[in-house]
Amino acid sequence: MAKQRPVKCPYCGKMIDRDYEFDWKKIGNRYWHDECYTKSQEEKEKNKDKQKKQREAVMKMAGKYLGAYVDYQKVAINIGQLIQAGVTYEQMAKSLKYWYEIKHNDPSRSNGGIWIVKSIYIEAENYFKRLEEIRTVQSEEQVNTDITDEHRVFVRPRDVNIYRKKPRFNLE
């Protein structure tokens, strides 16, 4: 019998010598250690539960912000498309909060979906990063946040002289 070449476990990355080791499985076209396969299946189940909870949270937020304008089928389709585009559930939630709570935009213009998230999630991420930076600076240092010291100066605009054309001839 010919010697089989070693294969790599996709979970731990260690090599499996199929001639001398007996604690491996072939799943599809991959070779796994028994423990590694059970661990990966447990992690997949945990991730599915976590993603399901996050998806439900985004659906609730969409219902909260869109109110009577929400179309849950559109929202579900939008979520699927956004996930394929690489937007995470956390980014979706932050974007919805940014767009409707902070920017105070009108939910009637959304047509029942959350597709606006694709356009603004980077802007929302930057906003929340800056907000977090400000909070860390304020917690580290004592920052004066009193508004009473601020004086407002109102400047009256200058009078603008409008030169009118003078008549060339006086016909009176």
Image (cartoon, helix red, strand yellow):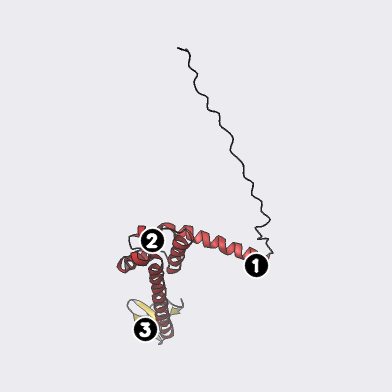
Q: Which residue is mark 2?
A: 107
Q: Give the residue type that dot 1 points to.
A: Ser
The reply to whether residue 80 is visible in this rendering is no
Please tell me which residue lies in front, 48 or 7. Answer: 48
Tag 3's secondary structure? Answer: strand
State the SS at label 2.
helix
Measured in 3D between alpha carbons, the distance from the residue under mark 2 to the one under mark 1, in whole angstroms, is 35 Å
Q: Note whether 165 is above or below 123 in the view shown.
A: above
Is 54 placed left or right of 152 in the picture? left
* Spot occupied by residue 97 in the image (x, y as percentages of width and height): 46, 64
Which of the two labelled residues, at mark 2 and mark 1, occupies the earlier sequence position?
Answer: 2
Extreme residue in the front direction: 172
Q: Residues within 10 Å of mark 2 (few under 14, many from 20)?
A: some
Residue 139 has which mark? 1
Q: Residue at x 33, y 76 (%)?
A: 29
Tell me the amino acid under the disc marked 3: Lys
| Residue 128 visible in this rendered orientation of the protein | yes
Dots 3, 2 in contact, CB < 8 A: no
Q: Which of labels 3 and 2 is toward the front?
A: 2
**Neighbour class for label 1 at 10 Å: few (<14), some, many (≥20)?**
few
Q: Point out which mark residue 115 bears.
A: none
The answer to whether the residues at label 3 and label 1 have Cβ atoms under 8 Å apart is no
Disc 2 or disc 1, which is closer to the eye? 2
Where is residue 128? Give x, y as percent.
52, 62
Which residue does the image show at 45% across and 68% down from the upper left? 90
Residue that numbered label 3 is attached to = 25
Q: Residue 117 is drawn in which quadrant?
A: bottom left
